[in-house]
Image (cartoon, helix red, strand yellow):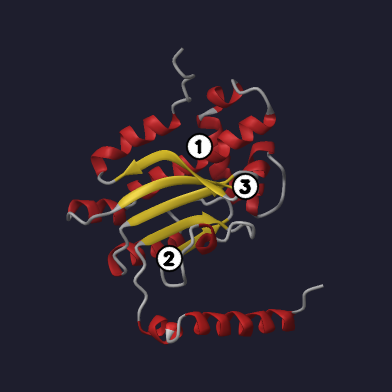
Amino acid sequence: MTTLQDLFDNNRRWAGAMEARDPGFFRRLEIQQAPQYLWIGCSDSRVPANDIVGLMPGELFVHRNVANIVVHTDLNCLSVIQYAVEVLRVRHVIVCGHYGCGGVEAAFERRKLGTIDNWLRQVQEVHARHAAALDRLGSKQERLRRLSELNVIEQARRVCETTVVQEAWSRGQSLSVHGWIYAVSDGHLRDLGFESACAEQTAAAYLSSVAPARPPAK
């Protein structure tokens, strides 16, 4: 069993390896962080943001919560977005969910888990909004996978609708919002087709990404 002391030992080995690979790394990191990306992801321990995109500390600004939800009354999330956009001047905001998300599954099954039920109402609202399309899918697993995708798309749209992003676009700041999903089963990311770089693109990006996939032409 891993102990707390093991974590400290792991930290010393990691810090030593980082410094050996890139002398002066921590000294430079201490002076300034200049990430180009804000990652809004799930708190799930199987989804380590920096690792799955191959970026070093200081290259990715991260906000995580259960089921990667963006709520316009969540001052924590809004503060992260504001700092990333206005102070760090990131160029990309990535909302990334993942298949097999426990929060999405709990919302789908309407399980009673306690306080978190209030938070997961956001995902239940996504489910209700797309109920007809989800019901057309064959299996529960397919519906869960698609609900995870739709939840990302809805949250990416919410990012676009924040006053922070709207004001950044109105002053001509270069900023794009993206919706991605991660598969724990193979470690691969998938682009869900939501990308908006200005207020005028958001509606079209949303409609395109929530549309059901068409079968290939014969």
Closest to the camera, between mark 1 and mark 3, is 3
In the picture, measured across the screen, residue 197 lies left or right of residue 116, that is left
In the picture, measured across the screen, residue 133 lies left or right of residue 173, that is right
| Marks 1/3: CA–CA distance | 20 Å
Q: Is residue 206 visible?
A: yes
**Residue 132, percent from left and from top:** 55, 22
- Which residue is farthest right? 1
Quadrant of residue 179 within the rendered picture: top left
Q: Secondary structure at mark 1?
A: helix
**Mark 1 residue type:** Leu
**Residue 169, percent from left and from top:** 23, 51
Comparing 161 with 178, the one in front is 178
**Residue 172, percent from left and from top:** 17, 54
In the picture, measured across the screen, residue 68 lies left or right of residue 25, that is right
Q: Secondary structure at mark 3?
A: loop
User: Mark 3–mark 2 contact, CB under 8 Å?
Assistant: no
Quarter of the image where the N terminus is located: bottom right
Q: Is 78 drawn above or below residue 10 in the view shown?
A: above
**Residue 102, percent from left and from top:** 67, 48
- Name the residue carrying label 3: 186
- Name the residue carrying label 2: 61
**Residue at image point 50% right, 80% down:** 21
Residue neighbourhood size for the residue with mark 2, other residues' Cα within 10 Å, grouped as few (<14), some (14–19), many (≥20) = many
User: Mark 1–mark 3 contact, CB under 8 Å?
Assistant: no
Q: Is 11 drawn above or below residue 42 in the view shown?
A: below
